[in-house]
Every structure is written in C-alpha cells, then in structure tokens.
Amino acid sequence: MELRHLRYFLAVAEQRGFTRAAEKVGIGQPPLSMQIKSLEEEIGGALFLRTSHGVELSEVGRVFLPHAQKAVDDAEQALRAAQQAASGEVGLLRMGFTSSAVFHPLVANALQQFRERHRKLEISLSEGITEQLLADIAASQLDAAFVRIVTTPSAELGVVELPAEKLKVALPRSHPLARRKSLRLQDLAGENFIMVPRGKGSALYDNIFNACQAAGFDPQVIQLAPQLTSAINLVASGLGISIVPEAIEQVQLAQVRYIEIREPAPRAQLSLAYHRQSIAASRFAAHLQRSLRRAAAPADKDPA
C-alpha cells in the first residue's frame, strides 16, 4: 500500500465517482480504477459499492476512510515539517558566545530580530571561552558562536566578521587619570594591568599588547581575569586598570570610569564562526550579514 493509493481512495470517496476523481488527481479513469482494485485486493474487501448514480463507500470503506485520511494528513504534516527544517524555519540553533559578545549592540539586535522572524526555531545559548567554542563547533556540539579570535574560513567553518570595535581604558574612579576625557597609550606606561589570559582570547590580548609595545612600553600585567566582565570587577576593587572593548562600557559600576584612547588606538575583533552544514546557523549568518550591511549603509552614502 502506497500513499498514492490512499489519495486515490479519498478522491473517489469525496467525488463519489471515478470520472470526477480521476480529473481531480490528474490521471485517467482506467488507471485510477486499476489502482483502487489493487488496493481492494490488498485489503481483502471492496471499498466501494457501484450504483447507478456512481459509487458509495462500502462498510469496509467507511471503516477505512478515517484511517486513510489521517495517514495522508500525517504525511503532509511530516512533509511540511521537513521542508521547514530544510529551510531553517524550525529546529534548534545552538549558539555560543564569549562573555563580552552579548554586550555588542549588533549581536543583541541580530539575535532579537532573528528570533522574532523564526519563532518556530528554538535557540539555545551557552557561554564559553573562544577556543572551546570553536572546538565545540568542529565537534558538531555547537552550530555557531561569537568569538574574539580571528578565524580563517574553511570548507566546514564559515566566518562573518563584525566591524572592528574601539577599545577603552577602564580605570578605578579614584585613579588620577580617571578625570581625563581621553588618554594616550603612553599615559598607561607603568600602570598595573588586568587582562584576560592570552589563551582565552588571543586576538584581543595580542592587539592590546602589540599596541602598548608600539607606544613604547610592555604592559605590566599583575592580574589575570577569567572573563572581561571579571576584569571590570577587579578594576572596581582598585587592583589596576584594563583595556576592554567599547561594548563592555555597558557594565556600569560606580567605581569604574571608561576613557577614550586617542589614535592610533587598538581595536577588538568579534566574529561569528558557524558550521556550514547547519542550516539554521547558515541562515543566521546570512541574517547577520544583512544586518551588518544595513548598519553600514548610512556611512556609505555620499553626503552630497
């Protein structure tokens, strides 16, 4: 018994005749009659009673009707569900992020808009360090992640880079430099630095360290923090200063001030890394790229 047999049976039952049913399903009447006969032979009983006005359901046909209808409805529902999954409309998007990524306005807006447009798609969020997030994507334990390391795309790994983000100096409010509107990197020579370990965000660590060296000094790192948000709490306690992405300024503590760095200033890079085989992740990556183009559009327009 095949699904087409059930559809033919339902068409004959609805139209109460083979001629009209054949027109509805798009085949000739003789082939339709043969398909119904084949179905009846498999069942072991007649499904229809032939009358002068057409056909009517037999007792066997009346018993068979609701089950046949349910089977066809279930098949169509399964097809729609599979098509939605194939288009990324339903399913699960497993998204990872570094602790600072959630503060980036483009990340928050892209996730919110994507969730609103794909309400049947479940999105799970998990926080981690960059290396582990990339390892989880490679192991198919995550579909995508926002990471701080500049990653090279590959056949399996797609990458969407966000615009480079300004860095700011986070200082205890009681620090003498906290009264400045802006600072040069040279002004930080001799200060005690609080930084995230290199292994947990090498691009950010290297950018800061290299910029300081270009300014003529090696940063004096006296404390390592597990996450950027932890670094801000240590700054608030007066242990030292830190250089952090501009988005971290949303972490507002009464004991901390964020100061602009004069050019040439280091930048922070945030990227979306995603598994190309994940339909949902690929769909989100395309959505993020559109969001980035819209965000950049006003700056690209000629003022004239």
Image (tube, rainbow, N blue to C red):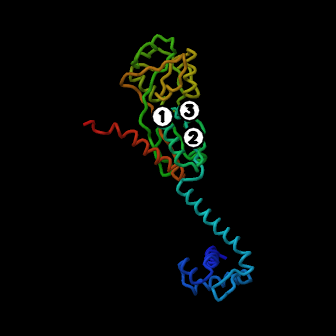
Per the image, label 1 sits on a secondary structure element best described as: helix
Going by the picture, which residue comes out furthest to the front? 53
Residue visible at 53% across and 78% down in the picture: 26
Judge from the rendering whether residue 179 lies leftward or rightward of residue 30; answer left or right. Answer: left
In the rendered image, the vertical position of residue 195 relative to residue 179, given as above or below: below
Q: Is residue 93 above or below residue 23?
A: above
Q: Which mark is residue 295?
A: none
Q: Nearer the viewer, mark 3 or mark 1?
A: 1
Q: Tell me the residue that label 1 is attached to.
A: 105
Given contact means CB atoms under 8 Å apart, are the residues at marks 3 and 2 in contact?
no
Q: Secondary structure at mark 3?
A: loop
Q: Split into 4 quadrants, where in the image is the C terminus? A: top left
* Residue in the picture at 41% in, 20% down: 185
Please report the residue visible at 55 percent of the width from the left and 38 percent of the height from the top.
97
Q: Please state the horizontal and vertical placement of residue 100, each as a whole percent of the image.
A: 53, 31
The residue lying at 67 percent from left, 76 percent from top is 1
Q: Is residue 49 left or right of residue 264?
A: right
Whole-percent x and y of residue 192?
A: 51, 16
Q: Amino acid at mark 3?
A: Ser
Task: Name the residue nearer the viewer: 146 or 46.
Answer: 46
Q: Earlier in the sequence, mark 1 or mark 2?
A: 2
Task: Name the residue carrying label 3.
Answer: 99
**Sequence-first disc among 3 and 1:** 3
The crowd level at tag 3 (other Cα within 10 Å; few <14, some 14-19, many 20+) is: many
> Amino acid type of disc 1?
Pro
Residue topped by disc 2: 96
Q: CA distance from mark 3 to mark 1?
A: 14 Å
Crowd rating for badge 1 (residues with CA inside 10 Å; few <14, some 14–19, many 20+) = few
Give how far apart the Cα atoms at labels 1 and 2 are.
Answer: 16 Å
